[in-house]
Image (cartoon, rainbow, N blue to C red):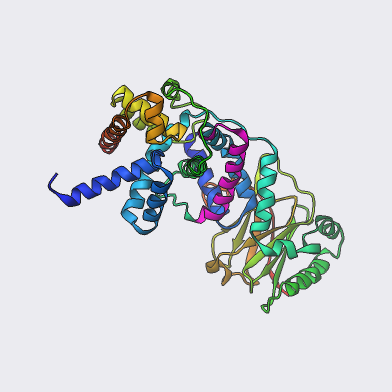
Amino acid sequence: MSDTGKKDSEGMGLTAAEYVLGVLNAAQRRAAERRIDRDPAFAREVAFWEERLGGLAQAVPEIAPPQRLWSRIEARLGRATNAEDERGGLWRSLSFWRGLGLGASALAAASTAALIYVGAVGTRASPLIARLDAEGGQAGFVAAVNTGGGSLTIVPASLLAAEQKAMELWLIPPGDKPHSLGLIDPNRPVTIKVPKDLLTRVNNEAVLAVSLEPPGGSPTGQPTGPVIANGKLAQL
Amino acid sequence: MDAEARRRQLAAALRRVAGGDRAALRHVYAETSAKLFGVCLRILNDRSEAEDVLQDVYLNVWRKARSFDEARASPITWLVAIARNRAIDRVRSGAGARSSAPIDAASDVPDPTPLAAETIETAQENRRLYSCLEELETRQQAAIRAAYMDGLTYEELAERSNVPLGTMKSWIRRGLAKLRACLER
């Protein structure tokens, strides 16, 4: 072949295919990985082959891993991320919140606890909190936004169960459509990072809502199931 | 649930994992761990090694979910690629000889029924891959499948098929070139 440029590009495609196929040795694999990082055309070739050859994995039989594996993964997640989880203490104690959810002074007490909590994690911004009422006016969740740190903690305040359904949290800024903040756990407090572009619109006019969605969350990016709890944010 | 709905759901869950959502990671695990464990076990041929690798795979997914690009990859092939890379790296790091199956074993694996209930990928994309594979010579096809599924090097493939290294390289390289031409048609 006389056209060097074309030959190079064919050679590149071949190396990408060989990398994805898995026939390269350790040193060649490292070289290919370095090239993925610095050569976008090569990275595109690798993506092409990963996508196309990926179909071969379909012929590999599924084998369920042992039950304990997920707990091992979850335990390592705890150490790997979100320092606030460890600092939560009382805030993250479910029985504490369950107790609050049953009392009439839930919101006042939650506000105090949220203030203490948000104070404890060292923010200077004024925190926002919300009580998300379920049907019948009972507190379903209590949420606090640490606007300084850009995180939101939501705590189940009563026993809510939804067989086969995921619970998804939505932020609705005034005059806007709902924005997903992710899935929450009906059994334990969850701390969520609020995306930067949304954080500026979290104010005491915004509403938080929880909807029931298929496992994995809404496939459309908007709530598709019934709203089981909602409430307005308030400045402390 | 049909394949397309499942794909959308997995992609949505990965977006949430990128935002630090553990419940979403759990969902991804529930949906895909049996497939990825099968993939790792096939390459490593050792349950405890495969368990270690699978654990790393999901921790990697947790950290790297942000780099998942829906426009470029389907969620399941993205996950399979992470699992295969981890498993192959583990094998290449000198874990020693693996118990070997004859190369024909890979070609004995039947083509999946494209519309099987467990189909994650859209059936159409896979039909294309399998029909293009059918256009290759039998030995090229068998070598490519064995390389992909068992994660073997050229040397290991040559040894298993009892052919010179150069012959194996040329089967695979020609096979890949033809495959690419067919896939792009």
- Which corner quadrant of the image does residue B139 belong to? top left
| Image position, residue B142 (x, y; %) | 37, 25
- Relative to the observer, which residue lies in front, A20 or B124? A20
Q: Quadrant of the C terminus of chain B?
A: top left
Please indicate whether residue B5 sits to the left or right of residue A83 in the image. left
Please indicate whether residue A136 sits to the left or right of residue A219 in the image. right
Residue at horizontal 66%, vertical 52%? A76
Q: State the extent of the magenta-drawn residues as a range.
A: B43-66
Examine the structure image and report whether residue B45 is included in the region drawn in magenta: yes
- Relative to the observer, which residue lies in front, B168 or B37? B168
Examine the structure image and report whether residue B27 is included in the region drawn in magenta: no
| Image position, residue A55 (x, y; %) | 42, 34
Eyeballing the image, is A79 above or below B8?
below
Q: Is there any visible trace of residue A214 in the rendered image? A: no
- Which corner quadrant of the image does residue B180 belong to? top left
| Image position, residue A7 (x, y; %) | 20, 47
Q: As drawn, which residue projects farthest toward the bottom?
A: A124
Q: Quadrant of the N terminus of chain B?
A: top right
Eyeballing the image, is A68 above or below A194?
above
Please indicate whether residue B153 sits to the left or right of residue B185 in the image. right
Eyeballing the image, is A75 above or below A18?
below
Task: Tell me the chief SS of the magenta region.
Answer: helix
| Image position, residue A230 (x, y; %) | 69, 58
Q: Is there any visible trace of residue A162 in the rendered image? A: yes
